[in-house]
Amino acid sequence: MDFDWDTVSEDAVFIIGAGRFGSRAARLLSGGDFQVFVVDLDAQRLSPLQSLPVRSVVHDGVRFLVENFAQVQENHIIV
């Protein structure tokens, strides 16, 4: 998976999973002054979030973290 880390801000939030908790977190956090990324393997779970100012990443959440851990900065937030 090629994720463009050049577009990720210093204060980005990564929400792993778009289930009940992840979707709620996306709704609550999407109004902030920071980027919100929601990672889920199931594109159908991500589709209800399209009306929010969040970026959807279709990928397994744990695998996304494992593959990209070196890119995560200390000020990024993982939910």
Image (tube, rainbow, N blue to C red):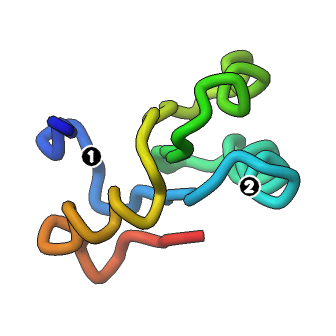
- Viewer-side residue, 53 vs 3: 3
Q: Where is the C terminus found, in terms of image quarters?
A: bottom right
- The residue at the far bottom in this view is 74
Tell me residue 5's x, y (percent): 17, 46
Image point (59%, 25%), residue name: 43
Along the line of sight, which residue is nearer the eye, 68 or 37?
68
In the rendered structure, which amino acid carries the disc numbered 2?
Answer: Gly
The image shows residue 79, relative to residue 46, as above or below, that is below
The crowd level at tag 1 (other Cα within 10 Å; few <14, some 14-19, many 20+) is some
Q: Secondary structure at mark 1?
A: loop
Give the answer, above or below, for where 44 lies relative to 32. Answer: above
Report the number of discs: 2
Residue, x 49% and y 49% (percent of image)? 34
Left or right: 55 in relation to 19: left
Q: Position of residue 66 (x, y in %)?
A: 27, 70
Q: Residues within 10 Å of mark 2 (few under 14, many from 20)?
A: many
Sequence order check, earlier mark of 1 and 2: 1
Q: Residue at x 78, y 50 (%)?
A: 19
Q: Which image quadrant is residue 3 in?
A: top left
Distance between the alpha carbons at the discs numbered 1 and 2 = 19 Å
Please provide percent x and percent y for residue 71. Answer: 15, 65
Q: Amino acid at mark 1?
A: Val
Q: Specify the quadrant that holds the N terminus.
A: top left
- Up/down of 19 relative to 46, above or below: below
Residue located at (49% from left, 45% from top): 37
> Circle 1 sits on which residue?
8
Numbered disc 2: secondary structure: helix
What residue is pinned by disc 2? Answer: 22
